[in-house]
Amino acid sequence: MTIPQDPHLCIDLHCHSTASDGALSPAALVERAAGRGVTHLSLTDHDTIAGLAEAETAAQAQGIVLIPGVELSCLWKSRTIHIVGLDFDPDADDFRQALEQQNDNRWARARMIAERLDKLGVDDLLGKASEAAGGDVPGRPHFAQVLTEAGVVRNAAQAFKRYLGNGKAGDVKAFWPELPEVVRWITEAGGVAVLAHPRKYQLTATKLRELTADFRRAGGQAIEVSTSGQSSGDLGFLAELCRKEKLLASQGSDFHFPGAPWCELGRIMKMPDGLEPVWHSFRQPVLSGAPA
């Protein structure tokens, strides 16, 4: 199950830390990745690069290569779509301003979630959720954690079922920028824009082809062909879509927390042959052998 074509490489280009909605700190995440044989890792927290500095320090200590990454939310035909940015310049001024805009959107969403759940009687719900997020913008998993600790629900699953899942009071949709704008942010910062986990949007095959074509026309360069939770049929379909649109192929576990064996760092189905890996196009291409 470990990735890719070269036996000396284990590349995971999609995972999350406490800087967004992950359970592990950036340093702990990198340490876990190294312990599972990952040689090249990209930390792709939602709409923030706040964890990159800590992750880079840990990566140097662990002897693995960290690729700058982020997962940005956007809209396509009124649907929320996620675009992973890889190998960009984290210090690009315009890119940082765009991330601040995304951060403002997330805080507005978090405040609205807290307001809608105020009737549950949890004191300082927003503050506690932010604390659970390491002081950053809380997402729905952090609200679920607080509701569990307050005894409102038995566990996170029940929190989502009653209050945070689709159609529930805490299911607040954010006002994200359109897909072409987000792709532009990434490419102008020197990065590669990747369509994240395409099969998770529950689109028909026809709609997914349409999304992928629009993404390519907007300047998108790659698609996640292999990610956790996919069937072999999904893998084959996405590989064919990747070939048809002449996109680069990416892969990543989309790891959020330990204890889910179907979604573990470095554990990804091998990509089909005949695809051009996205890491061949990085500013420092990853071609073969052990990490530099």
Image (cartoon, helix red, strand yellow):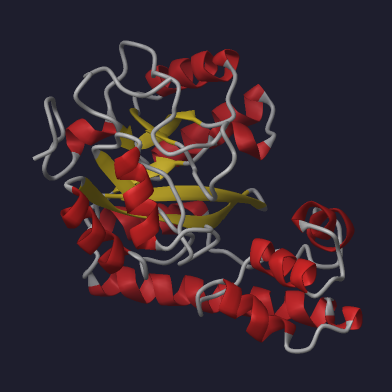
- Counting from the top left corner in percent of width and height, residue 68 is at 27, 55
Q: Residue furthest bottom?
A: 124
- Counting from the top left corner in percent of width and height, residue 232 is at 55, 14
The answer to whether residue 146 is above or below residue 27 is below
Total marks in image: 0
Instruction: Judge whether residue 274 can be spotted in this image.
Output: yes
The answer to whether residue 25 is above or below residue 44 is below
At a point 44% along the width and 33% down the height, the residue shown is: 224
- Counting from the top left corner in percent of width and height, residue 239 is at 44, 18
Instruction: Judge whether residue 43 can be spotted in this image.
Output: no
At a point 27% along the width and 27% down the height, the residue shown is: 277
| Quadrant of image for the C terminus | top left
Between 220 and 280, the one nearer to me in the picture: 280
Q: Residue furthest left?
A: 292
At a point 49% along the width and 71% down the height, the residue shown is: 102
Q: Residue furthest top?
A: 273
Question: In the shown orientation, is residue 72 left or right of residue 63?
Answer: right
Which quarter of the figure has residue 291? top left
Between 177 and 24, the one nearer to me in the picture: 24
At a point 21% along the width and 70% down the height, the residue shown is: 91
| Quadrant of image for the N terminus | top left
- Counting from the top left corner in percent of width and height, residue 52 is at 30, 63
The answer to whether residue 248 is above or below residue 269 is below
